[in-house]
Image (tube, rainbow, N blue to C red):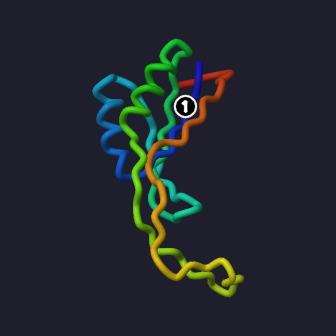
């Protein structure tokens, strides 16, 4: 058994959630915040059998697309302003960061 932890941007979360439900894959959703852009993310925790890992990863890959977005930088509060850029910067957002972990035990009470 494996635990798949997929961190996706909020814009992709509904699409991924609907696709998981359509494919009868159970998941737990957690609201999270990214550390770099400080924007909303959703973290999906999916427990699955070893032989289903590749199909779940394919669903995540197809549901979560990266894209370019203009982001207004956050000004440093009391920190070093040497690297502060005062105008919006285009960055790549979206996609998914996925971890696949082995599970020693699984209990459902």
Q: Identify the residue at the far bottom of this view.
A: 78
Question: Which residue is identified by label 1?
Answer: 4
Question: Which residue occupies the foreground of this view, 10 or 28?
Answer: 10
Question: Which residue occupies the foreground of this view, 88 or 8?
Answer: 88
Residue at the image point whose x is 60% and y is 35% from the top = 99
53 left or right, relative to 24 = right
User: Helix or strand or loop: what does disc 1 sit on?
Assistant: strand
* Circle 1 crowding by C-alpha within 10 Å: few under 14, some 14–19, many from 20: many
The x and y percentages for residue 52 are: 48, 16
Give the quadrant of residue 81: bottom right
The x and y percentages for residue 57 are: 47, 27
Question: Which residue occupies the foreground of this view, 32 or 81?
Answer: 81
Q: Identify the residue at the far top of this view.
A: 51
In which quadrant of the rendered image does the N terminus lie? top right
103 left or right, relative to 38 = right
Query: Is residue 106 positioned above or below 11 on the image?
Result: above
The x and y percentages for residue 79 are: 70, 83
Give the quadrant of residue 24: top left
């Amino acid at each position: 058994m494996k635990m798949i932890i997929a961190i996706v941007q909020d814009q992709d979360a509904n699409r991924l959630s609907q696709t998981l439900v359509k494919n009868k894959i159970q998941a737990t959703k957690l609201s999270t915040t990214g550390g770099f852009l400080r924007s909303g993310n959703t973290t999906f925790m999916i427990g699955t059998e070893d032989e289903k890992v590749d199909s779940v990863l394919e669903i995540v890959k197809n549901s979560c697309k990266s894209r370019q977005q203009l982001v207004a930088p956050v000004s440093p509060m009391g920190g070093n302003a040497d690297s502060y850029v005062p105008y919006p910067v285009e960055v790549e957002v979206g996609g998914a960061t996925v971890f696949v972990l082995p599970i020693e035990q699984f209990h459902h009470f």
